[in-house]
Image (cartoon, rainbow, N blue to C red):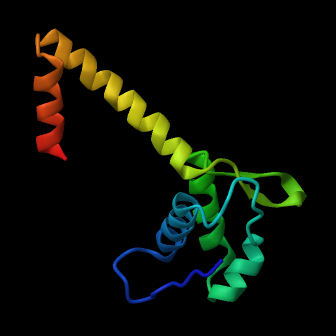
């Protein structure tokens, strides 16, 4: 897992770490069940405070992307693509209901989606 932090970036370091791990999960580079480096190890590798990396892990955990199992470490909980699929399905359901309430045909609703793409 290769992560880097740019101290001159507008984003705070914890957010850079979080976004990069999220991206690795999304791309499939970090598969479900993969153990992440310890907070101390990653902080040392990146030259960051332990609390900075801990915050990144905590936010990833809040998004249900990773899970900390006490002394056993932090693991990738689910593939991001699966999370995205669930979010996309929920959004599609909301859109379909709104289109039906507006008495749109499937073709009309599809055209709206196509233009938004």
Quadrant for the N terminus, please: bottom right
Q: Position of residue 78 (x, y in %)?
A: 65, 47
Residue 33 appears left or right of 53: right
Closer to us: 93 or 43: 93
In the image, farthest residue toward the right:
71
Quarter of the image for residue 74 reads: bottom right
Quarter of the image for residue 52 reads: bottom right
Closer to us: 20 or 42: 20
Vertical relation: 43 (above or below) 25:
below
Residue 44 appears left or right of 6: right
Q: Residue at x 61, y 81 (%)?
A: 2
Vertical relation: 92 (above or below) 54:
above
Q: Residue at x 41, y 30 (%)?
A: 89
Vertical relation: 99 (above or below) 35:
above
* Count of marks placed on residues: 0
Residue 28 appears left or right of 77: left
Q: Position of residue 113 (x, y in %)?
A: 18, 36
Vertical relation: 56 (above or below) 81:
below
Q: Position of residue 57 (x, y in %)?
A: 64, 61
In the image, farthest residue toward the front:
107
Q: Residue at x 82, y 51 (%)?
A: 69
Q: Position of residue 91 (x, y in %)?
A: 34, 31
Closer to us: 115 or 5: 115
């Amino acid at each position: 897992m290769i992560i880097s932090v740019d101290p001159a970036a507008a984003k705070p370091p914890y957010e850079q770490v979080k976004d990069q791990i999220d991206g690795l999960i999304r791309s499939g580079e970090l598969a479900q069940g993969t153990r992440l480096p310890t907070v101390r190890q990653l902080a040392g590798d990146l030259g960051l405070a332990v609390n900075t990396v801990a915050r990144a892990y905590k936010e990833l955990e809040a998004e249900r992307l990773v899970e900390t199992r006490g002394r056993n470490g932090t693991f990738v909980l689910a593939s991001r693509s699966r999370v995205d699929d669930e979010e996309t399905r929920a959004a599609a359901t909301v859109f379909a209901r709104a289109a039906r309430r507006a008495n749109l045909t499937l073709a009309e609703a599809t055209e709206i989606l196509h233009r938004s793409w």
